[in-house]
Image (tube, rainbow, N blue to C red):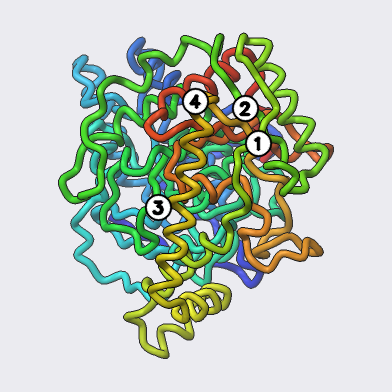
Amino acid sequence: MTDRIAPTDTEGHAAAPSLPGAQIPAPGTEARPAPVTATALLAAYRAGTLSPVDATRDALARIEATEPLVNAFVRVDGEAALAQAEESARRWERGEPAGLLDGVPVTVKDILLQRGGPTFKGSRTIRAGGPWEEDAPSVARLREHGAVFLGKTTTPEFGWKGVTDSPLSGATRNPYDPALTSGGSSGGGAAAVALGAGPLALGTDGGGSVRIPAAFCGVFALKPTYGRVPLYPASAFGTLAHVGPMTLDARDAALMMDVISGSDARDWSQLGPVAESFRAGLDEGVRGLRVAYSPTLGGQVAVDPAVAAAVRTGVERLAALGAWVSEDDPDFTDPVEAFHTLWFSGAARVVQPLGPEARALLDPGLREICGQGARYSALDYLAAVDTRMELGRRMGRFHERYDLLVTPTLPITAFEAGREAPKGSGHRRWTGWTPFTYPFNLTQQPAASVPVGTDARGLPVGLQIVGPRHADALVLRAAHALYTAGAAGIAPPAL
C-alpha cells in the first residue's frame, strides 16, 4: 500500500496526488458530468452497463483534477482502490456481489481507523509507524459489503472545530469557491462527495461535523441517533460523538446506514441490531406528519436573509407535500456553555498524554481550548451534564407534539478558508456560528442537513431536519420526500 500525506504549498493547498489509472481530460475539452449516486452505480453494475473499475477510475480522476484546489484528502491509494474495484468487477460478472455496496467508491474521514495505513487525525503528534491492523466498526462494515476505499479525507486536529484546517494538511477548501472553507470537521468527506470523488463519505459528528460541511458543500448528511452506528475506539468527546454518512441524497444515506449500523462488540454503548432496513419506508412521504419550523430558535439566532429564504421555501414544500407545518420553537436557551464544558474537557483529555514538545505542534486554537478544558472541575462537568439532561427532557416533550423539527442547518453560508469564525462576526469559537447543530449532539437526536438552495453568490444553503431519538428512518424519509419533489439538491460545483 502506498501511503501519501498530502504535501502542502506555502498557502496550505495540497499538491496533486499521483493516482495510477486516472485519466484526466484536457481542460476545456469535456464538460464535467454531474456526480453519480451509489444507487445509480449499483443499478448500472447490475445491468452490466458500467464496471466498478470505470467508477473508481472516474472518482480517482476527479481527485487528481480537483485536489490541488480543494485539498480534501490526507492519503489516496489509487493502486489499491483499482485492485479492489477489479475484484468487485469479477464478483459482479459472476453474479455474486459481496454486499450492498460492492464496487461503490467511498472515502473515510481520517479520524476513523482503517487497516493498512495510519490514522493521523489531522495531527503532527501521531506517528506513521504501524501496524495499523484494525478497522473502526463502520469501516469494517463497509469493507464487508465490498466498498472500494479511495482514501482518507481531511479533518481539523482531532476533529475539534467546525472548519477543516490542520497543522498536518493545511486548509480544505469549498468546491463552490476555493477561497472559502468547506466547513468541518468532516470537511474533506463533504467536499469529496460534492466533487464526484466517490458518492459516499464516512464522517463523524460531535457538534455538527457532518451537517456543517454538508450545508457548506451542498450535499446530504445524517447524524444518526447516538449509538446507532458503533464507534471504536471511543471518542474522548464521549457521548457527543456520532458516526454518520455524507452522500449525494437521502436514498444513498439510507443505503449506507443499512451497512454501517451493524452491531460491533467493541462499542458497549451501541444500540444493537436494526429492526428493519432504513430504506423500507423511504417513499412513504410526509403527509400527515407534524412538523415544527423554527427559523431562529425563538429569536436567539440571527440568520442571513438568503439562508432564511431558501429554508422557508423548503419548509413550504414540506407543507405542499401534506405535512402539518407550524412555526414553533423548542423550549430551550442556547446551551453553548454546557457544550463548551463537555467539549473542551474532552479536548483536554485527548492531549493529556502529550509532553511539551508534542503540545507545541498542536493547532494554537486547540491548545487554547485544552487549557480551558483542563481548568474545569468535576462539579463543572456534572453541572453541564445536568444542563444536557434538562435539554433532553425538553426536546422529548417537544416531540410529543411534533414528529419533526426543521431549522436552518447554519445561519450563514461558507466564509473565508483558514479561519475558525467569519471575519467581523464577533465570534471567537466555531460554536458562535453553529447554534443550530450542537444542541442536538447534547440530546443525541438524529439530525440531517439537506441542500435546499443557494445564496446570491451561488453558495449552498442547508435545511436541518431533527427527529426524536431513534427516529432516524423518519428523518431520512422526510429528506427523501424533498429530493423526490425536486426541492432538495443543487447543481454540482464547476470545478
Which of these two is toward me, 240 or 101? 240
x 28%, y 39%: residue = 83
Instruction: Locate residue 55 relative to residue 478 in the image: left or right.
Output: left
Local SS, label 3: loop
- Mark toward the start of the polypeptide (3 vs 4): 3
**Label 2: few (<14), some or many (≥20) within 10 Å?**
many
Going by the numbered disc 1, the residue's amino acid type is Asp
Residue lying furthest left in this view?
A: 265
- Residue 459 figure quarter: top right
x 57%, y 37%: residue = 194
Local SS, label 1: loop
- Mark toward the start of the polypeptide (3 vs 2): 3
Q: Is residue 170 above or below residue 140?
A: below
Local SS, label 2: strand
- Residue 481 figure quarter: top right
Rendered location of residue 321, percent (x, y): 63, 10
Going by the numbered disc 3, the residue's amino acid type is Ala
Q: Which residue is mark 1?
A: 329
Q: Is residue 276 above or below residue 288?
A: below
Image quadrant for the N terminus?
Answer: bottom left
- Mark toward the start of the polypeptide (2 vs 1): 2
Rendered location of residue 38, percent (x, y): 43, 25
Q: Which residue is mark 3?
A: 241
Rendered location of residue 149, percent (x, y): 34, 42
Image quadrant for the C terminus?
Answer: top right
Residue 250 numbered mark, or none = 4
Q: Is residue 472 above or below residue 132?
A: above
Q: Which residue is mark 2?
A: 292
